Amino acid sequence: MHESQDLSPDSLVVAAGRPDRERDAPVNPSVVLSSTFLGTGPLGDGDRGYGRYANPTWEPFEDALGRLEGSPEPALLFSSGLAAVSAALSLVPLGGLVVMPGHSYAGTVQMATELAEKGLFTLRLVDVTDTEATLEALSADGGAADLLWLESPTNPMLGVADLPTLIEAAHARGALVVVDNTFCTPLIQQPLLLGADLVLHSVTKYLAGHSDVVLGALVARDAGLRSTLLHHRTLHGSIAGPWEAWLALRGLRTLALRVERSQASAQILAERLAAQSAVERVRFPGLPEDPGHERAKAQLKGFGSILAIDMAAGWGRTGAENADALVRALHLWMPATSLGGVESLIERRRRHVAEPESVPENLVRLSVGIENAEDLWADLSQALDALPAHGG
Ligand SMILES: Cc1ncc(COP(=O)(O)O)c(C=O)c1O
């Protein structure tokens, strides 16, 4: 294969970030455990210098993710998704305006809210599925937004934004556009190709895929923007450990298979859950009756593998109590926060105090893993069947 050969994403996840093809070279990059690098130039200089500036173990993953997102630039790995959020928000000028979905990941909203409360910028939280309202927020009160934050589908409401329209409108007002692409991965959505300036990932989730690391990443199309973010990462020290970076690349190798399997199962489970009387509503863009379905069909290469259900009240209990009873009665599904790993996880989101009150108390988020879909259904089904008998 020639380096310049155009590979499909499911080959790229396997082939990108490999060591050079030299006799007896390893097929995988090595973990480089060194906090400093030799400077052998005339001034004692080298290209890497110190372990907070660079580590060769980051580079194969950064190269692979940059290519997957369709950027000419390598990605930048961060110590967590939120460290990447912090770096992205640092791009907002003092006194600037940020427009953000109120239903972005709760940690992102919390960070933006705290920074806004300190007076660093003005924050407008919007319902990003409402295109008109979002467009209005971008230019209301005579001002123009400096940064449009997008997350689509949103976490955990699964709302789908009209990305092309919002990106174009934000650019027309001179705003930078960041898209959190954690839920979709570049296999389902490539925001840079829709015109976004920056893509963010909680690498912790699908990209690494095994619930064994916490990492984040940013991908910029523009070299200048990347270098500003690199400067931020270096100064703030929000860097990845070499082991974690290596594990993320190892996880990425199976991303296409994992996404294919888990989203096929999510579709089956969403359809079956929608027919259950104990389930008031299923939120999943793959269902034709979902408000985001048409948009998702037009914008995405799949519907992903996160779904949410609003549990009905009944048997003398509120919907939230039934949600808790459901989660407690499961054996295969694991009651834990996070998403995007090989194992299926389930949780009632409002158990977190930081979750906005606009997320219903009875909403349960399901991250569908790669187990057998019938086993996952059997477990859900027995837990739903047990609800009437379940002690309050
Ligand atoms: C959509 C989304 N973005 C960002 C984050 C933050 O990432 P991390 O937990 O890796 O800091 C999360 C974490 O759940 C998330 O779901």
Image (tube, helix red, strand yellow):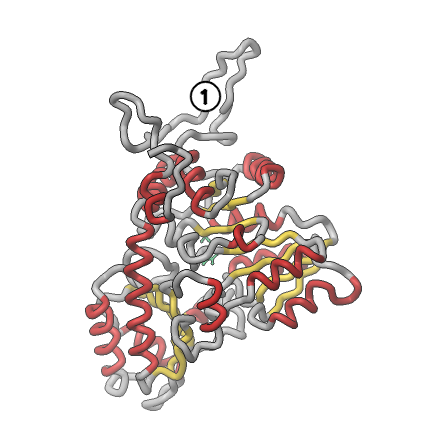
53 over 114 or under it: above or below: above
Q: How many numbered callouts?
A: 1
Residue 15 or residue 114, whichever sits in front? 15
Residue 279 or residue 334, whichever sits in front? 279
Q: Quadrant of residue 247?
A: top left
Residue 117 or residue 109, whichever sits in front? 109
Relative image position of residue 369 (x, y in whole percent): 29, 61
Q: Residue at x 43, y 52 (%)?
A: 186
- Can I make out residue 121 in this image? no
Instruction: Confirm or reject: label 1 Cβ below 8 Å from ligand 1.
Output: no
In this view, the residue farthest toward the top is 42
In what element is the residue under mark 1? loop
- Can I make out residue 264 in this image? yes
Image position of 332 (left or right of 162): left
Relative image position of residue 171 (x, y in whole percent): 67, 55
Q: Residues within 10 Å of mark 1 (few under 14, many from 20)?
A: some
The N terminus sits in image quarter: top left
391 over 161 or under it: above or below: below
Name the residue that disc number 1 marks. Answer: 37
